[in-house]
Image (cartoon, coloured by chain):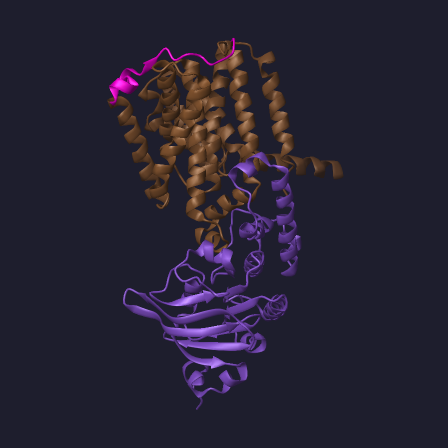
Chain colours: A brown, B purple
Amino acid sequence: MRLKPVLPILFFSCAVLCGPFFITSPYFLEILIFIGIYSLITLGLNLLMGFAGQISLGHAAFYAIGAYSSAILTTRYNMHFGISIPIALCMAAGIAYIVGVPSLRLKGHYLAMATLAFGEIIHICLNAAVDLTGGPSGIAGIPQMQVGQFVFDTEIKYYYLVWAIFIVLFIMTQNIIHSRVGRALQSIHGSETAASAMGVNVANYKVQVFMLSAVFAALSGVLYAHYITFISPQTSDLMFSIRLVTMVVVGGMGHIWGGLLGAGILTVLPEFLSIFEDYDMLIYGCILLVMVMFLPGGVVRGAEVVYSKLINLIRRSKGE
Amino acid sequence: MSETVLQACNIRKEFGGIVALDALSFDIGRGSITAIIGPNGAGKTTLINVMSGLFPPERGTIVLNGNAITGRKSHDISRLGIARTFQTAQIFNNMTVLENVMVGRHTKTTAGMFRAALTLPGARREEKQIREKALHFLGMVGLRDAAGLPAASIPIGNQRLLEIARALAVEPDVLLLDEPAAGLNTQETRTLGELIRTIKSLGMTVIIIEHDMELVMDISDMIMVLNFGQKIAWGRPADIQSNPEVIAVYLGEEE
């Protein structure tokens, strides 16, 4: 049986709460904010890839759709966040539905190609629709988030905002995984034929989970846009989609903590490696390669194996 | 025989010009065990695939409990009351034994994405029921002790039993078993026969494809013999055993 799933998230919430008492430098806080923003996408992407077994190489597009929708509505139409954010999320869900219904009939490489093409189309549109999106120069002056008189203008405020949202969505995702819906998604990953023989409406669930992961990505894009207050097509290119998938794979596909861990590793690693100057990308690539080769189940499962071996070792040494 | 639960009328299925099933009609009585036998390539698995909605027939109708189910999707047919196992066990390798069976409760439960995400009291109660039912059916096939294991880690014989437990969890009217005894030893086959009898005693109708003649003759109420997609014989085990045409095509010609 699984460990009681409540304990780890409780522990993690405490760590998040106490974090800023130890980390006060705005530079480190900013890194933590970015980990939070990326973890939101990888949480949804892991549900799609790791649990339901459907790959997407186009999730940067949903991130961009969220960021641009809210940015355009707040800068051009002076809309309040309370309205722009729901609209941005609905936009992402709607587009995910339109893209998902035909492309989720495809499998494996073909689905990867279809979602990749979708990502590129959005990327090209963002560059080309200059009147709406500002083209390659993007949109500047996006307002900061504000509730009443309270403006999320410092690193520490934004840190708590992002991580509070993450923890809420994490708990909801965990609930889904351990439910009838989560099992249906996993059964699709296991065998589509058997899943539908058990009464699971495979096509329907695939579209649902695709939409849900798109909404997570869009929310993450919204948080990014109103934090940096600037957005351009560069922030959501193909490389970003690939990095998101890499985060999930490195962290641990099909493990609820995998997305978070992968986002953490892939965000922190380049910062650390910058001391190697010209060789940083080379070393970065090598580390990723080694991780994928030796930890095919992701870092989370590697950690689980090490942990259980340690426990066994301690038990044995006590017994003798 | 009692009331009819499943009725097939004039079923025809082709694959690229090759006729797999031809003008096939039969009635299955509620609560009976029917075996489908025949040489390899006779169309037995195709028939099960058509009945469970994996693909539609070119012609003909299938009626379950008085409702036509021809051409409906697999997941609809499962909800309407037909569950099945597969010739090569198709268990969900990424889940535990218990979770596999819990998937079988899908059509009997209702929690959607949002209700599940918020884990409302109703969803929690439903989840508890799913778990209890799943454990009950696991116990029926004798796999209760393996509940927490990864499904991929249990022996192939047990994977077949797991598939049966998963199909039982659907609580179908009709259970289709595609060669459940393949790869089992004599003792396991005997246990399987007992299990199928128990399933029948619960009021379920069983249709079984099987090559193990001892098992077939032992448990079946009726036997249908297929050859080249056509029904060549239909009757009680004793009649089938003495049917000269069946002996010729299947059981081997007498000298």
Q: Is residue A142 magenta?
A: yes
Specify the farthest residue to the front.
B66
| Quadrant housing the C terminus of chain A | top right
The residue sitting at 58% across, 53% down in the picture is B101
Quick check: is B126 in the magenta stretch? no
Q: Quadrant of the N terminus of chain A?
A: top right
**Residue A32, placed above or below residue B232:** above
Q: Measured along the vertical axis of the image, is residue A65 above or below residue A227?
A: below
Residue at the limit of the structure toward the bottom, as seen here: B255
Percent across and percent down for residue A105 are 36, 46
The range drawn in magenta is: A129-149
Could you say which is closer to the camera, residue B51 or residue A17? B51
Residue at x 61%, y 23% (from the top left corner) = A13
Who's the residue at 37% across and 61% down the image?
A: B56
Q: Is residue A230 above or below residue B225?
A: above
The answer to whether residue B214 is above or below residue B176 is below
Whether residue A291 is visible here, answered yes or no, is no
Quarter-wise, where is residue B142 in the image? bottom right
Apparent side of residue A71 relative to residue B93 in the rendered image (left or right) = left
